[in-house]
Amino acid sequence: MVEDKQLKQVLNIMNTLLEASEHLSGLVKERELNQSVFMFSSIVEGFGAIDSVLTPTQVKSGEKRKKRNRATSFVSCPTNGTRKPA
């Protein structure tokens, strides 16, 4: 599970990515292509940093959600789970 310290770091990185994206937009409008490429690569690198933390958490919560959905579908299906609900 993701710790509070990691979540704070992810939030800080996400805020930085937001600022960097806004800056990138300005660079592109000004046709500063070299700086745009550098900024874009920094944004991709930052996303990779938070993705490595968030993906395992999302996978675990997604698996739980799928199991829960299957269970509720089974219970709520009028054919007692022998047919998938529409």
Image (cartoon, rainbow, N blue to C red):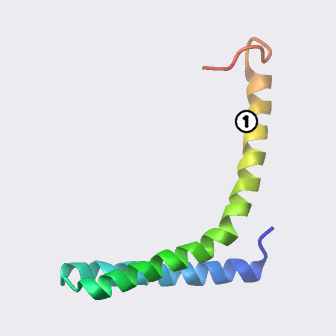
Q: Quadrant of the C terminus?
A: top right
Residue depicted at x 43% and y 79%: 41
The local crowd at label 1, few if under 14, some if 14 to 19, many if 20 or more residues have their Cα within 10 Å, is few
Given residues 10 and 27, the one toward you in this image is 27
Residue depicted at x 73% and y 27%: 73
Q: Is residue 74 above or below residue 34?
A: above
Q: Position of residue 3 (x, y in %)?
A: 79, 76
Given residues 84 and 36, the one toward you in this image is 36
Residue depicted at x 67% and y 67%: 54
Q: Position of residue 39 (x, y in %)?
A: 38, 84
Given residues 37 and 50, the one toward you in this image is 37
Q: Quadrant of residue 83?
A: top right
Q: Is residue 47 left or right of residue 31?
A: right
Q: Is residue 15 left or right of residue 80?
A: left
- Inspect the image, locate mark 1, and give the three-letter code of the amino acid beneath it: Asn
Q: Quadrant of the N terminus?
A: bottom right
Residue depicted at x 60% and y 79%: 11
Q: Is residue 23 above or below residue 60?
A: below
Q: Position of residue 84 (x, y in %)?
A: 68, 19
Q: List the single residue furthest toward the top.
A: 79
Q: Is residue 34 left or right of residue 47?
A: left
Q: Position of residue 61 (x, y in %)?
A: 74, 53
Q: Is residue 26 above or below residue 77?
A: below
Which secondary structure lies at badge 1? helix
Task: Report which residue position mark 1 lands on.
Answer: 69
Q: Is residue 64 left or right of residue 31?
A: right
Number of numbered labels in the structure image = 1
Q: Is residue 13 above or below residue 67?
A: below
